[in-house]
Image: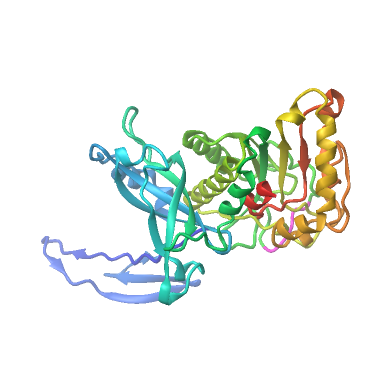
């Protein structure tokens, strides 16, 4: 989820008299790190460290912005479900709504979304959020993040455009007022992409899982600063982020988005994933949405439990509508499992707070079931249900649109 760039640091040596002299250059390699030797000193070519020096970034961020201009970061989902983005400058009056934003394009052959001989893919703006990575003084026009979906130049949605399919599923059903609350779990690793935060290198924690869930203390909680920064950034952006907590496996975290109505749930969940990736980019921490990043040992996987409630379910006697919906889900269990995320078979084993993927079941307050009904919902006879089957890397548009 992180993107890295190659940075070559160049410099020059100055003589005592103040005249410039040609530097002596020689490449050396120490412990696998390439360096450039100039005038006897060693300059590391390690990248990404500028994010750790706020004074360097602040120098540029303090520069004034032109009036009536906005930076718009267009964000989209690629063929593999990963997020991509690029920036453009727009006049403020073009950024008032998705309808006033111009369409854009990108090289689809570089994202597995188009062939090289016809590579142009069209980005269509669908939702706007404030950009937490480019804040502006109070009262100035905010820079924006733009959630887009993808089309051919002739206007046909790409096969990877699951948002289009979900929007069609919601069309004409606005009277249901379907709320979604999505619980996004994720796992944080060191940049070796092998060692989760809080784990010893090439080893495992000496304590079994248990102390790490909703934990406090340096021996239990790993990644809280990242989750807190994500939380603030999402609130600033205007996302309906409703909470966070440390998860069962050390190095695993969770945040919740919602309640959101209809297609807005997918837009907000994907934009929250984008913000998560950008925050981890700043911290130089690798984040994975893989549903079972650690397969050896007794460790929980990661899911995206999805809470669902229609207006009928929230009204008096809504428990009947909840059970009807659950029975419908059960009838399509195999279809849902096939669409609920790659690698989910490693997670849905019947252990570690999951139901076996080949079995559909439901229960009250049962976290080992496919569908959980909350105890409050059962007692009040109305509310919502939780689908615990979607994996952490699932397609949020597909899950909500099914």
Residue 134 x, y percent position in the rendering: 38, 42
The residue at the point 77 percent across, 50 percent down is: 389
Which of 149/368 is in front? Answer: 149
Range drawn in magenta: 202-206
Magenta-span inclusion, residue 85: no
The residue at the point 80 percent across, 43 percent down is: 210
Q: Is residue 47 visible?
A: no
Q: Dividing the image into 4 quarters, which one contains the N terminus?
A: bottom right
Residue 383 x, y percent position in the rendering: 77, 29
Name the dominant secondary structure of the magenta segment: loop
Which of 261/146 is in front? Answer: 261
Residue 61 lies left or right of residue 258; in this view the side is left
Residue 188 lies left or right of residue 212; in this view the side is left
Residue 181 lies left or right of residue 42; in this view the side is right
Which of 293/369 is in front? Answer: 369
Which residue of the protein is positioned furthest toward the front in this rendering? 172
Q: Is residue 207 visible?
A: yes
Q: Quadrant of residue 195?
A: bottom right
Residue 310 x, y percent position in the rendering: 71, 33
């Amino acid at each position: 989820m992180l993107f890295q760039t190659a940075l070559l640091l160049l410099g020059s040596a100055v003589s005592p008299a103040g005249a410039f002299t040609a530097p002596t250059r020689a490449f050396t390699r120490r412990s696998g790190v390439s360096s450039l030797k100039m005038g006897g000193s060693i300059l590391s070519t390690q990248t990404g460290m500028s994010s750790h020096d706020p004074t360097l970034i602040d120098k540029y961020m303090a520069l004034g912005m032109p009036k009536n201009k906005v930076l718009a970061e267009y964000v989209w989902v690629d063929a593999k479900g990963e997020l991509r983005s690029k920036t453009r400058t727009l006049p403020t009056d073009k950024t008032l709504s998705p309808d006033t934003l111009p369409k854009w394009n990108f090289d689809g052959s570089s994202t597995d979304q188009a062939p090289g001989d016809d590579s142009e893919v069209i980005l269509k703006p669908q939702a706007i959020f404030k950009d937490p990575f480019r804040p502006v003084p109070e009262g100035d026009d905010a820079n924006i993040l733009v959630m887009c979906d993808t089309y051919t130049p002739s206007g046909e949605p790409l096969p990877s455009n699951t948002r289009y399919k979900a929007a069609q599923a919601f069309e004409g059903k606005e009277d249901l007022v379907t709320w979604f609350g999505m619980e996004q779990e994720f796992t944080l690793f060191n940049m070796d992409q092998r060692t989760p935060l809080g784990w010893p290198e090439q080893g495992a924690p000496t304590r079994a899982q248990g102390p790490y869930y909703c934990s406090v203390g340096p021996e239990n909680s790993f990644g809280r600063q990242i989750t807190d920064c994500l939380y603030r950034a999402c609130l600033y952006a205007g996302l309906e982020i409703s909470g966070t907590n440390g998860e069962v496996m050390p190095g695993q975290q969770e945040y919740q988005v919602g309640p959101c109505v209809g297609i807005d749930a997918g837009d907000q969940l994907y934009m929250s994933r984008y913000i998560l990736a950008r925050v981890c980019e700043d911290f130089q921490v690798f984040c994975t949405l893989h549903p079972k990043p650690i397969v050896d040992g007794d460790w929980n996987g990661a899911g995206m439990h999805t809470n669902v409630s229609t207006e009928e379910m929230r009204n008096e006697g809504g428990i009947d509508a909840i059970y009807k919906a659950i029975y419908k889900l059960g009838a399509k269990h195999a279809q849902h499992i096939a669409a609920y995320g790659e690698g989910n078979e490693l997670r849905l084993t019947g252990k570690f707070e999951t139901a076996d993927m080949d079995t559909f079941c439901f229960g009250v307050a049962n976290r080992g079931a496919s569908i959980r009904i909350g105890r409050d919902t059962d007692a009040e006879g109305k509310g919502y249900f939780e689908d615990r089957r979607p994996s952490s890397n699932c397609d949020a548009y597909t899950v909500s649109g099914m």
